[in-house]
Image: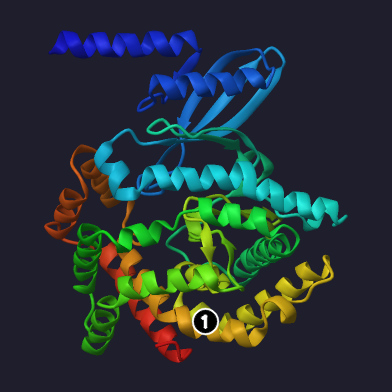
């Protein structure tokens, strides 16, 4: 057995050496290596050295294996970020890896470029353009999917602490991004309805697939019960239990409604803190950029708004700014549409926005509570869960969590987050 392992490692090293790949090259198969090498060659750097580094901490990336590559060549140097699909079949099935990568590849290679092309054609100033990471190449070949992107760290963008509430200025920056993205969906619908419908049909709602899988829905409920154990307030517990019971059925119904709702847009779909990067100059926020489009789909604009607000901020911050944020989003939507001689009142009136917030709030409440089990875990817990997913499956990962005492810091975070979500939804009349 030792000889076989040594032989495998030796072969792997030989493969890497052929491509001048060094560093953290684990969990990369030959198909992915060949594609990465091809994209590097296309940059005309005459690469002599390519070093791989891990990106983020355990639990930062649930679907992809993410690495930074530093390329040194005769004609210059370059850094890229590579997102690679897991080869583990349990993990692929659990996280719908093939669909997630298909969504993101479509967004980076077709949808986002098309939306920016609309802005360029209208003569909109570059500083108003929808900003997204440059895509150097993408391989949409299961189970070897790869997306190679611009390293935004090189432009001064950073990721913030997922355990800390985003500030008012950070939230407004994201809302501006949403307004631009959503407004361009409306423009595309009007100017090129066939193109929009093609994108709409190709983007698959990952949450719908989860909602139709009894095993996954059961495990989400079990995971939530684990987190609920940190609560003392029985009223809060009862509210959560009653809402979770209807969550997945409601999710499917609302998804069906969105297909025929004229105000639906192509949304980012997963705007939590780890999927957004920020650029500061002298401690002042200059801009933000969304970096993950694996959950993108056709849906109501409020799904992006509410998901971000209730998963990236705390109750205290929401109490101060929630209503202003909704006002700000709608005004930015109108401003972006004005470039195309359209108005928010004509495509997504404020009355409709308010109605949609009420319509989608119960589902967003349930999703936010369920995601507590993922978003509040520390690095060690997330690493253990990911290791279990890689070696066994979702059942085993949940069992590990269920039979492991929740660390005090995690319990405190989860309790504060859940109580804050409940209190906010009550305060804003959303339950």
Q: Quadrant of residue 190?
A: bottom right
Vertical order, 309 against 23 (above or below): below
- Within 10 angstroms of label 1, few (less than 14), some, or many (20 or more) residues? some
**124 vs 224, nearest the viewer:** 124
Residue in view at x 70 percent, y 63 percent? 180
- In percent of width and height, residue 65 lies at 41, 37
> Where is mark 1, residue-wise?
357
Residue 246 location (% of width, % of height): 29, 78
In the displayed structure, 155 sits above or below 202; it is above
From the image, which quarter does the N terminus lie in? top left
User: Can residue 130 be seen in the rendering of this structure?
Assistant: yes
Q: Which of the 4 image quarters holds residue 221?
A: bottom left
- The spot of residue 296 in percent (x, y) is 51, 56
Residue drawn at (52%, 50%) of the image: 202
Disc count in the image?
A: 1
**Residue 57, visible in the rendered structure:** no
In the foreground, 168 or 305: 305
Q: Nearer the viewer, residue 429 or 420?
A: 429
What percent of the width, then of the height, locates residue 160? 52, 56
């Amino acid at each position: 057995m030792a000889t076989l392992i040594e032989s495998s490692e030796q072969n792997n090293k030989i493969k890497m050496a052929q491509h001048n790949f060094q560093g953290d090259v684990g969990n990369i198969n030959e198909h992915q290596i060949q594609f990465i090498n091809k994209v590097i060659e296309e940059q005309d750097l005459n690469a002599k050295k390519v070093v791989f580094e891990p990106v983020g901490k355990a639990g930062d990336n649930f679907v992809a294996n993410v690495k930074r590559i530093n390329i040194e060549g005769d004609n210059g140097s370059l850094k890229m970020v590579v997102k690679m699909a897991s080869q583990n079949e349990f993990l692929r099935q659990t996280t719908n890896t093939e669909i997630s990568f298909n969504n993101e590849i479509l967004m980076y290679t077709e949808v986002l470029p098309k939306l920016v092309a609309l802005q360029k054609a209208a003569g909109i100033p570059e500083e108003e353009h929808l900003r997204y990471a440059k895509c150097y190449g993408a391989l949409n070949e299961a189970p070897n999917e790869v997306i190679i992107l611009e390293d935004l760290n090189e432009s001064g963008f950073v990721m913030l602490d997922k355990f800390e509430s985003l500030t008012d200025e950070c939230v407004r920056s994201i809302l501006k991004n949403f307004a631009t993205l959503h407004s361009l969906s409306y423009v595309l619908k009007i100017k090129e309805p066939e193109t929009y419908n093609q994108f709409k049909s190709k983007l698959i709602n990952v949450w719908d697939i989860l909602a139709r899988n009894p095993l996954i829905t059961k495990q989400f409920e079990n995971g939530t019960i684990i987190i609920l154990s940190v609560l003392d307030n029985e009223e809060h517990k009862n509210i959560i239990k009653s809402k979770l019971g209807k969550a997945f059925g409601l999710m499917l119904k609302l998804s069906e409604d969105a297909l025929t709702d004229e105000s639906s847009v192509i949304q980012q779909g997963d705007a939590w803190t780890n999927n957004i990067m920020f650029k500061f100059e002298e401690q002042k926020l200059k801009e933000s950029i969304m970096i993950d489009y694996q959950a993108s789909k056709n849906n109501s604009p409020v799904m992006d708004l509410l998901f971000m607000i209730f998963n990236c901020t705390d109750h205290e911050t929401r109490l101060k700014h929630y209503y202003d944020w909704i006002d700000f989003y709608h005004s930015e939507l109108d401003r972006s549409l004005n470039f195309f001689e359209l108005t928010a009142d004509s495509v997504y009136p404020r009355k409709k926005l308010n109605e949609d917030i009420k319509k989608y709030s119960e589902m967003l409440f349930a999703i936010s509570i369920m995601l507590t089990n993922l978003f509040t875990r520390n690095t060690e817990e997330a690493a253990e869960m990911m290791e279990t997913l890689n070696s066994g499956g979702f059942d085993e990962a949940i069992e590990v969590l269920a039979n492991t005492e929740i660390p005090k810091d995690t319990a405190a975070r989860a309790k504060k987050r859940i109580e804050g979500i409940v209190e906010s939804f009550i305060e804003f009349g959303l339950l």
